[in-house]
Amino acid sequence: MLPAAKYLVQIVMAGTQVVGRAFMRALRQEFAASQQAAQKAGGGKQGTRRAAADTVQGMTLQEALQILNLKGVEDVEALQKNYEHLFNANDKSKGGSFYIQSKVVRAKERIESELKDQHDMAQKKQTRKNTEET
């Protein structure tokens, strides 16, 4: 084997190891951040579920509430009213920002996801309660 080829193979191998280590370190950091987010969101199953929803939606529930100027997820009428106002106000044809408009849409989706999760959990509790009574 030529000396240049030998050095080239060593360089490629060293580079691969560096990238592999960096990837594993980033993966560990992401896992740790996910664990912290789950604990911060309330711990247990609910915190893990909420952290997973944040990851999937790309936005925390708190961010979504701030974007749509809501105090809680319960007020569905205010959610719809604020969503329509902000969506229309940021229409690109009216000189608005597509970026902000997309944030408004994502915020509404995140809150609707939370409402659906709460509804599903309430149904499961009711089913368990009905099962225990019989």
Image: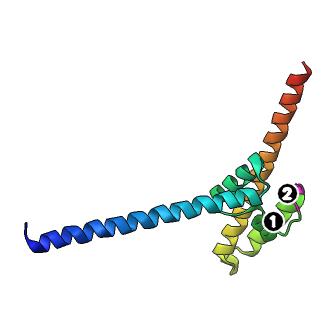
Rendered image quadrant of residue 99: bottom right
**Circle 2 SS class:** loop
Q: Amino acid at mark 2?
A: Val
Please indicate whether residue 133 sits to the left or right of residue 37 in the image: right
Quote the CA–CA distance across marks 2 and 1: 8 Å
Rendered image quadrant of residue 107: bottom right
- The residue tagged 1 is 65
Q: Are marks 2 and 1 in contact (CB under 8 Å)?
A: yes
Q: Is residue 59 above or below residue 122?
A: below
Q: Nearer the viewer, residue 112 or 132?
A: 132
Q: Position of residue 48 (x, y in %)?
A: 71, 51
Identify the disc placed on residue 107.
none
Q: Nearer the viewer, residue 89 or 79?
A: 79
Q: Residue at x 79, y 40 (%)?
A: 120
Please provide the residue range marked out in magenta: 72-76
Q: Residue at x 76, y 75 (%)?
A: 89
Q: Residue at x 70, y 56 (%)?
A: 51
Q: Amino acid at mark 1?
A: Leu
Nearest to N terminus: mark 2 or mark 1: 1
Q: Is residue 124 magenta?
A: no
Identify the disc placed on residue 73.
2
Please indicate whether residue 70 sits to the left or right of residue 46 in the image: right
Q: Is residue 122 above or below residue 25?
A: above
Outermost residue to the bottom = 95
Q: Position of residue 38 (x, y in %)?
A: 71, 56
Q: Is residue 50 above or below residue 1?
A: above
